Structure formats: structure tokens, C-alpha cells
Image (tube, coloured by chain):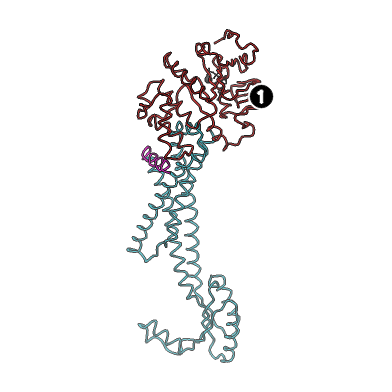
Chain colours: A cyan, B red
Amino acid sequence: MRLTVREVILGLRRAPLLSALSILTIAFSLFAFGLFGLVALNVSRTLRTIEERVEIRAFIADGTPVEAVSAAVGDIAAFPEVARVDMISPEQALARARKELAEFNDVFDADVLPASLEIRLKPGYRDPKTVQAVAARIRTYTFVDDVRYGEDWVRKLYNIRNVAGATGLVLGIAFAAVAVIIIGSTIRMTVLARAKEISIMRLVGATDGFVRRPFLIDGFVKGVVGGVLALLLAWLAHSLMDRYLIQTTFFDRSMAIVGVVSGGFIGLLGSAVSVGRHLHEV
Amino acid sequence: MIRFTHVTKEYPRTGIALNDVSFRIGKGEFAFLTGPSGAGKSTILKLVFMEEKPTSGDVRVSGMHASEIKRHEIPLLRRRLGIVFQDFRLLEDRTAAENVAFALEVTGAPRDTIPSRVSRLLTQVGLASKGTSYPRELSGGEQQRVAIARALVNDPMVLIADEPTGNLDDRATRGIFQLLRDINAAGTAVLMATHNLDLVRRSDYRVIEVNRGQIVFDSADSADAAEPLPPTSA
Ligand SMILES: Nc1ncnc2c1ncn2[C@@H]1O[C@H](COP(=O)(O)OP(=O)(O)OP(=O)(O)O)[C@@H](O)[C@H]1O
Ligand SMILES: [Mg+2]
């Protein structure tokens, strides 16, 4: 073990520039990944709170008999997607509107607001497609004048989340591939610089695993350092955004750990590839 | 212990280096491998420590067959051999003692036993006082002694030496040769490729002469082993 640690430190000291380059590439690839990850994370967190408020509102035509509406309420409440149905009388609607929009108090008049049904969906059924389907079913009641469910912004938010997630994933993978290649070639240079040492190791009976180990540790350590750096950069970006743009949440601890460890694995993979290639040539 | 049976070795670009070579080396034996440059001596030694595989025929070393050995078993084989080259192959940035210790660390020897074993080995090769010297501070003969000490760390059954005196003057050559004789006297077999016919003639060890990839003479084959050496083409 002490031998291994010594080899890692030697490796850093022998090629400080190359080591820095490997660390930075890993840091930037994870940073790019992290930025888009942050966007996706925040959008989906917002989505979740908004989703809880997703409701379908069915406006009821004037003069509809109360029994017809109550029967419909019973029907709709039995839909598998529906959590609850509330009937809102014109008076209740008015009271709510007054409370929410106090500035416009005078504008509202009891007769302007129609009676409506407020339908809330169960969790898992709040995506645009399901909402739309349920809305369509409710629309089939003849006494229902109109159905609203904020289709546009629900769909937009979903799109933003998906695009951010996919972009982050694609860019992250592309950068990670570049990082693997760069760290692979920097470690390859160290391997070549130490070819004599490796050949002597093999001559005196070192196993491939023993020869490989210091390089793998070297790569892993560089990757972890790169990962920590990426985390710092992402945190910086997050704080700036928080301060000057909008309130955002940061990765929680387990996500941060996963990020740093992936850096380690990128480094490990890069080293494994280049050392493996060298060992197969000799 | 070492047995070659109808061994042929063909290199991808240079063609046939060994052609139908058969011989065996027993426990504790000392044998010279001689012959002109390019005859195939180094190739034979590489086959012994399995850096190369035979194209056909069988190479058996310490119970392991070249045709069956797995890549991960080769290090285990090498730990039963000691290998020494003309160019010493020491690490320049390590002292004599560290170079010897390196071979022990690599094979996972218990840490606390390493210093005493290293100093015992350096004493054995006559370098007790040079442990802290770097290779560049040592003469060629001394560097080769360090290499030999390193080759002995695992108490090998056989020491493989490819022209160990090739870079040395007469005095150093005699010193190294005497050291190899002592090692052999203590029970380790020695297989040594050399151009130095003086050494060969002055001792009565077995001589295997190779020419153009074939064994053209083996003193162990001649019933009257006392017969003087044939003239060589080197
Ligand atoms: N790695 C290799 N690849 C291709 N050809 C090789 C290789 N090693 C040796 N040869 C060829 O095999 C033949 C035998 O070479 P070898 O090194 O065994 O000779 P040698 O008897 O040790 O010579 P010397 O006394 O000069 O060291 C030569 O023709 C050489 O060109
Ligand atoms: Mg040779």
C-alpha cells in the first residue's frame, strides 16, 4: 500500500502539467453535466409543486339542475385518475376571487362567475396526457360549458425538463468520452515514460494487477479531484444564479457524491484503457 | 527442470530464429549457451522465461508448459527464475538496495523482512558497503552484482544470464563469473549465454552451441565429455 501511494505521488510530481490537464478535463465534463443536471433538477422540482396544484376546472352551464351536477360529481369521483371533486358555487368562486385578487375587488359580481367543478388528480396522473384525457371525458357532459386545465404551461414545463435532462445527458456523455480519451493519453505518456520500470517489474515477477494498480489509483484520484472541482464550479454557478436570477436548489449530498465518484470512474476507465493497451503490447 | 522438445520459433518479420531445438537442463546444472551473433541464444532464454512462446514444439520450465501457461501464471514462473542481462536493467533513480528491495516489494514479500534480506543479498554479491549508492555511482561490474542480487531475491531454481559479462572488462568479467560459480555451487542452476570463449574454455561446465537456430554441439551429448571443445565460428 505504501508503495502504491508513493507511486501515485511520484506520478503527480513527474508530470504536473499532464496531471493538471487530466483533472481539468474531467472537471469540465462533469461541470457541463452538472449545469444541465441542475436545470433539470430545478425544473422538475418546480414541476412537482405545480403538479400538486394541477386541477381541471369544469364550468357548468347556468340553470343546470343540482341533481344532474351531483350525479356527475359522483361519476367523476369514481374515475381511477381522480383524487377528489369539489363543487364550487358562484358565491364561493366570488369569495375566492376576492381573496386572491384583492386589488380587483370591485370588478367582481356574483353573477359573472359561473358554478364549476374542481377536479384534482391522483399523483402519477398529473402529466399532460392524462390531464388532457380526463378533461376530454368531462367535456362530454352536456351541461359542461368549458373545461380548463392550463394545458400550455403544463406541457411547456415538461418540455423544459425533458430537454434540459437530455441535453445534460448527451453533453455529459460527450465530455466524459473526451475526458476518458484525454486522461487515457496522459496516463499513456506516464506509462511510456515508465516503460523500463514496468518491464523490470514484469521481469522480476510482478503480476499485471500489481503493475496496473498505481496507474489505476492515479487515474481514480485525478478523477475524484476533477469531480470535486466540478462540484465547486457548479455550486458557484448555482449561488450566482440564486443571487441574481431565481431561487434554485442545489444537488443533495448523495447526488454530489455520485458526481464525484463518477469523476473517479472516468479517471479509472481512462487509465485502465491505456495501461491495458501497454500491457498487451509487451 | 528446463526441457525443450523440438522447439521451433518463428518471428513475424525476421522468420525462423530456432529450428527443432531439443535439450534439457537439470537441477543445479551450469550450462553455457554459445554461438555467433544472431544464432538464437537470446531467443532460447526468452522462451525459458516465457517472454516468447514457441511456434511449435514444447518448452517446459519448472513443471509449466509454454503451450498451457496462462498469462497470469507467468509472473509466478518468473519468481522461480532469476534473470540477468548484459545491460543490468537497474532503475537509475533508486539506490542499489532499493533496486534489490523493489523485486521483493513487487512480489509482495512481507515488508519487515525486506531490509534484512536485501542486506544479506548485497553481502552475498560482495556489495555490503554499496547499498546506498545509485547505479551511476557504481562500476559496470558492481551494477551487474546488484542485478544478480536482485535476481536472487526469490531463491530461484535457475539463474538465466544473457551475456552478463558483455559490457565488462576482463577483471570484472572474472569477478562476475566467479560469483555465478559460487551461486551454482550453492545449488542454483545457471544457464548463461556468452560470447566469451575464454570463460567457456577455462571451466569444464556444459556447453551448448547454437548456430543459425540449431544446436550444433552439446557437450552433454558427447559420450566422452572430456573431449576438447570444437573450434567455434564466433
Ligand atoms: N523480437 C524479435 N522480433 C523479430 N526477430 C527477432 C526478435 N528477436 C530476435 N529476432 C531474430 O531472431 C534471430 C536470433 O536472435 P537472438 O537475439 O536470439 O540471437 P543471439 O544468439 O542472442 O545473438 P547475439 O549474440 O547477437 O545476442 C535473429 O535473426 C534476430 O533478428
Ligand atoms: Mg542475444
> Which three-letter amino acid code belongs to the residue tagged 1?
Thr
The chain identifier of the residue carrying mark 1 reads B
Q: Is residue A45 magenta?
A: no
Tell me residue B70's x, y (percent). 60, 36
**Which residue is drawn at the image coordinates 37% and 37% (left, top)?**
A14
Q: Is residue A9 magenta?
A: yes
**Which residue is drawn at the image coordinates 53% and 89% (left, top)?**
A62
**Range of magenta residues:** A1-16
Q: As rendered, which of B17 and A207 lies closer to the eye?
A: A207
* Image quadrant in which you'd find residue A215: top left
Question: Among all residues in the image, which is located at the extreme left?
Answer: A243
Q: Taking A253 as reference, is B172 above or below it?
A: above
Disc 1 target residue: B5
- Location of the N terminus of chain B by quadrant is top right
Left or right: where A117 falls relative to B4: left
Left or right: where A65 falls relative to A195: right
Tell me residue B134's x, y (percent). 36, 28
**Which residue is drawn at the image coordinates 45% and 23% (left, top)?**
B87
Please state the total of marks drawn on the protein image: 1
Q: Taking A177 as reference, is A118 above or below it?
A: below
User: Under 8 Å from ligand 1: the CB of mark 1?
Assistant: no
Tell me residue A29's x, y (percent). 43, 50
Left or right: where A267 falls relative to B233: left
- Location of the C terminus of chain B by quadrant is top right
Could you say whether the residue bearing mark 1 is in a helix, strand or loop? strand
Q: Taking B92 as reference, is A115 above or below it?
A: below
Count neighbours of disc 1 (C-alpha within 10 A) and say few if under 14, some if 14 to 19, many if 20 or more.
some
Q: Taking A211 as reference, is B12 above or below it?
A: above
**Main SS type for the magenta part?**
helix
Tell me residue A78's x, y (percent). 60, 82
Q: As rendered, which of A138 and A198 lies closer to the eye?
A: A198
